Image (spheres, rainbow, N blue to C red):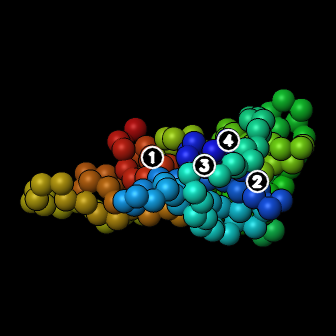
Amino acid sequence: MDALDLKPGMIIEVDGIIYSVMSAVHTQQQQRRGMVRCKVKELKSGKSNEFLWRSDVRINLIIVEERALTFLYRDSSGFHFMDSVSFEESFLSPEIVGDNALYMKENDEITGLIYEGKILDIKVPFFVELKVVETDPGFRGDTVQAAKKPATLETGLVVQVPLFINTDDTIQVDTRTGGYVTRV
């Protein structure tokens, strides 16, 4: 496929290294060829990189299989998952899981991206429900429009929530933005 067709979430191979596309922006300067600036994450190490290609450069797209996984637990070495179909247990390093760890609780269903029998990356659902572990109380009289306060969730994630959210409330969080959606 052409570099112009790249979209976030695609898996590509460049010089034998497999990357996940985080963003791809097409730019064109006056009387010059179009260029594609692509930010990618190396799936093996978790490092991010940036490429700049002409828009007509051919890119090797990797076709991956999506499989349902259950997050079992986290220990000092990394994260343990179970395939929901074959019940096979897999291990992923913290570099591969990355920021997704802030949205996962034990026994949550997630999607694993499998290539040649190996888990390359994981995708968490767009919305997750997490419990508020710690937050300041909202005081009566704090009626400034759209006032927010920080709240620490059960996974360690800190989000800005409205003043009426209290400790032990369950809230819905958007994993794409990391922001508060609604109280559950």
User: Which residue is located at x 29 percent, y 63 percent?
Assistant: 149
Query: Which of pointers 1 and 3 indicates the residue nearer the eye?
Result: 3
Q: Nearer the viewer, mark 3 or mark 2?
A: 3
**In the rendered structure, are the residues bearing label 1 and label 3 in contact, judged by CB atoms less than 8 Å apart?**
no
Earlier-in-chain disc, 1 versus 2? 2
Residue matched to label 1: 174
Mark 4: which secondary structure?
A: loop
Judging depth in this view, the residue of 80 and 97 nearest the camera is 97
Counting labels gives 4
Q: Is residue 137 left or right of residue 77?
A: left
Residue type, numbered disc 1 = Asp
Residue 83 badge: none
Earlier in the chain: of badge 4 and badge 2, it is 4
- Closer to the camera: disc 4 or disc 3? 3
How would you rate the neighbour count of disc 1 (Cα within 10 Å): few for under 14, some for 14-19, many for 20 or more? some
Of labels 4 and 3, earlier in sequence is 4
Q: Earlier in the sequence, mark 1 or mark 3?
A: 3
Query: Contact, CB < 8 Å: mark 1 with mark 2?
Result: no
The residue lying at 50 percent from left, 49 percent from top is: 175
Q: Tell me the distance, in whole angstroms, between the alpha carbons under discs 4 and 3.
A: 9 Å
Mark yes or no: residue 132 visible: no
Give the Cα distance between marks 3 and 2.
16 Å
Dot 2 corresponds to which residue?
13
Rendered residue at 36%/44% (across/down): 181
The residue to which callout 3 is attached is 56
Q: Amino acid at mark 4?
A: Met
Foreground disc of the pair 1, 2: 2
Q: Which x, y percent locates residue 67? A: 76, 35
Label 4 to label 1: alpha-carbon separation: 31 Å
> Which quarter of the image is occupied by the N terminus?
top right
Residue occupied by mark 4: 1
